[in-house]
Amino acid sequence: MGNSKKSASKNVAEGAAAKFGDLQIRDSLTGMAPEPLLNVGVRQGANLVTGELNVNPGTPLQMEIYLDKSSAPVYGLLVSYMKVSDTRAQEETIIFNGSVQHY
């Protein structure tokens, strides 16, 4: 069975080569993409928190991770792990393996 997978993909590649013939690249194209800038923010309700924030336990906060406007159409973003903390003794994992951890 292990060889059937290799044979099938080899057959597909050979079939594509026969259908399209030889590929000749005559021109080159060079482009520049914007340098991605990663932004992180915390919202309490609709307000973006801009400085220190004292909240009571259980106060809902929203963490935002996003790319700047010029690089967002070019790049993607995958967050697989995120831990938040206010002290070394108190921390919480909110994203693990790309899934939001509900508390």
Image (tube, rainbow, N blue to C red):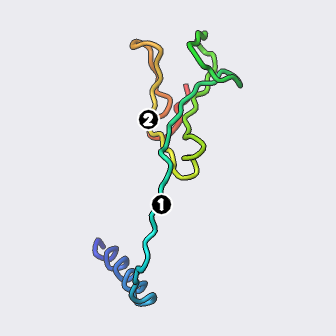
- Residue type (three-letter) at the residue carrying disc 1: Gly
Q: Which mark is residue 31?
A: 1
**Mark 2 burial class by Cα count in 10 Å: few <14, some 14-19, many 20+:** few
Residue 21, horizontal then vertical, whole percent: 41, 89
Q: Residue at x 58, y 46 (%)?
A: 70
Q: Earlier in the sequence, mark 1 or mark 2?
A: 1
Q: Tell me what residue is drawn at x 47 percent, y 39 percent.
A: 79
In this view, the residue in front, 36 or 17, is: 36
In the rendered structure, the answer to whether residue 92 lies left or right of residue 45 reads left
* Residue 67 coordinates in the image, percent (x, y): 55, 40
* In front of the other: 67 or 96: 67
Nearest the camera: 100 or 33?
33
The mark found on residue 43 in the picture is none
Q: Which residue in the protein does label 2 denote?
A: 81
Q: Label 1, label 2: how many angstroms apart (C-alpha)? A: 32 Å
- Look at the picture and state if 54 lies above or below 71: above
